[in-house]
Image (cartoon, rainbow, N blue to C red):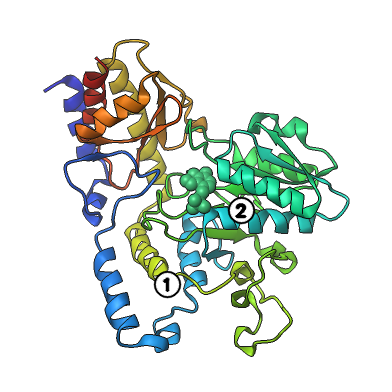
């Protein structure tokens, strides 16, 4: 056994999160794509079967009340809240991240007032955020400027209404400085909207602590909610009375069953709701969130950094120098929970890795992306992934 394989065994033996692996359905594939679709938590299939057979099949319409379907968006939002550093009553689950970006941005512009005529968006953002920011700007009569996160402080001005940023860059895995950027946005009187897709469930976010105004995120990555599971929207408590949704559906009406022809928003986070929630997906997510019982996000972060450090060390030991170049920052303060390696033949390399039982993903044009989910990825798997990568690249 190699020195690194022995070290991996020792690290696994000392890992306090290692027992959490049994909360997931896993096999002998090294699964490093939990930053795209999280693995299946063990209790989900049975719960979904109960929701379908009993709640839907037997209770039918009664389940909206008796099985808690109607209040699921707020209830599950409160389950996500501690994972992103939010007190209860500020998160509502539903719709996709894309739709929630739209709600958050337009609401932010409306809160910022008429005198502020510019929106800033992360120029390196996941594309959907950029497309929606462009449409939100057009709809609200603002101009949109795309700038990199490091350029944000100098781009801010009295004209800025809102800024849309990613906490972790989906391609490079770079972690942006949420506290400092939020403070800079506030110092110029604008609102900060954060996309947490690649950070929630992998590292501490501290939404309340850092005074974030609005945030969105998906639940199918590090929160393991399942394919297409609903996203969430955070609206800071003190802003909720001013949250004027651009999609005011009947589910966010103060009296949804009053069937009034005119809209009156409900109080609190449920202003972020729109229409009938996607109950099957939502309750699969609720079951999936049970894996977080007793888990500290700080411990998850510590393991995530240890895994990504160890992966980089193994890659440099097993791979010819210069064959791949990491585009993920070295400093822990700037690293999310993935390692992205630039490699000219990345698409072909990833296919061969998958054939050999190591699943990451390829991002156009030349990035090999490996996501490390601390709840179920081991150090032994990390060593194996780097060893197989070295063989494939040789
Ligand atoms: C950072 C980021 N934002 C937004 C999205 C889009 O999410 P959805 O397709 O669920 O709307 C993704 C999807 O992967 C993402 O990674």
| Mark 1 surroundings within 10 Å by alpha-carbon count, few (fewer than 14), some (14 through 19), many (20 or more) | many
State the quadrant of the N terminus: top left
Q: Mark 2 vs mark 1: which is more N-terminal?
A: 2
State the quadrant of the C terminus: top left
Q: Nearer the viewer, residue 383 or 124?
A: 124
| Label 2 beta carbon within 8 A of ligand 1 | yes
Residue 196 on image: x %, y %: 53, 48
Q: Does 325 sit left or right of 151 as displayed?
A: left
Q: Residue at x 47, y 30 (%)?
A: 332
Of helix, strand and loop, which one carries label 2? helix
The residue where tag 1 is placed is: 279
Q: Does 387 sit left or right of 51 as displayed?
A: left
Residue 276 on image: x %, y %: 52, 74
Residue 208 on image: x %, y %: 60, 55
Q: Does 156 sit left or right of 180 as displayed?
A: right
Of helix, strand and loop, which one carries label 1? helix
Residue 300 on image: x %, y %: 38, 45
Can residue 196 be seen in the rendering of this structure? no
Quarter holding residue 15: top left
Numbered label attached to residue 101: 2
Q: Residue at x 48, y 33 (%)?
A: 171
Quarter holding residue 134: top right
Quarter holding residue 219: bottom left
Q: Residue at x 49, y 79 (%)?
A: 70
Can residue 255 be seen in the rendering of this structure? yes
Q: Are marks 2 and 1 in contact (CB under 8 Å)?
A: no
Numbered label attached to residue 45: none
In this view, 94 is above or below 23: below
Spatial CA distance of label 2 from label 1 is: 21 Å
| The furthest residue to the top | 321
């Amino acid at each position: 056994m190699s020195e690194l394989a022995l070290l991996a065994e020792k690290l696994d033996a000392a890992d306090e999160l290692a027992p959490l692996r049994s909360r997931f359905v896993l096999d002998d594939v090294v699964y490093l794509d939990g930053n795209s679709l999280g693995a299946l938590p063990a209790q989900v299939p049975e719960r979904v079967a109960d929701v379908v057979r009993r709640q839907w099949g037997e209770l039918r319409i009664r389940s909206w009340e008796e099985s808690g379907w109607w209040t699921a968006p707020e209830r599950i939002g409160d389950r996500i809240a501690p994972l992103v550093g939010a007190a209860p009553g500020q998160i509502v689950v539903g719709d996709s991240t894309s739709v929630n970006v739209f709600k958050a941005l337009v609401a932010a512009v409306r809160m910022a007032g008429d005198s502020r005529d510019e929106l800033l968006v992360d120029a390196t953002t996941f594309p959907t955020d950029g497309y929606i920011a462009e449409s939100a700007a057009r709809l609200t009569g603002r101009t949109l400027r795309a700038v990199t996160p490091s350029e944000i402080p100098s781009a801010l001005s009295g004209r800025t209404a809102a800024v849309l940023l990613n906490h972790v860059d989906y391609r490079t895995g770079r972690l942006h400085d949420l506290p400092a950027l939020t403070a800079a946005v506030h110092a110029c009187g604008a609102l900060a909207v954060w996309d947490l897709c690649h950070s929630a469930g992998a590292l501490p976010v501290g939404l309340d602590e850092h005074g974030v105004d609005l945030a969105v995120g998906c639940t199918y990555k590090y929160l393991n909610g399942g394919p297409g599971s609903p996203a969430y929207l955070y609206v800071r408590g003190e802003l909720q009375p001013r949250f004027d949704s651009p999609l005011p559906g009947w589910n966010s009406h103060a009296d949804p069953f009053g069937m009034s022809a005119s809209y009156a928003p409900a109080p609190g986070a449920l202003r972020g709701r729109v229409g009938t929630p996607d109950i099957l997906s939502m309750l699969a997510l609720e079951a999936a969130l049970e894996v977080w019982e007793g888990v500290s996000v700080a411990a998850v972060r510590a393991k995530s950094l240890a895994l990504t450090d160890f992966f980089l060390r193994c890659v440099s030991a097993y791979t010819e120098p210069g064959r791949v170049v990491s585009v993920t920052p070295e400093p822990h303060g700037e690293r999310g929970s993935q390692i992205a390696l630039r490699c000219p033949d990345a698409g072909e390399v990833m296919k061969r890795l998958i054939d050999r039982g190591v699943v990451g993903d390829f991002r156009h044009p030349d990035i090999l992306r490996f996501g490390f989910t601390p709840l179920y990825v081991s150090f032994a798997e990390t060593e194996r992934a780097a060893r197989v990568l070295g063989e494939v690249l040789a």
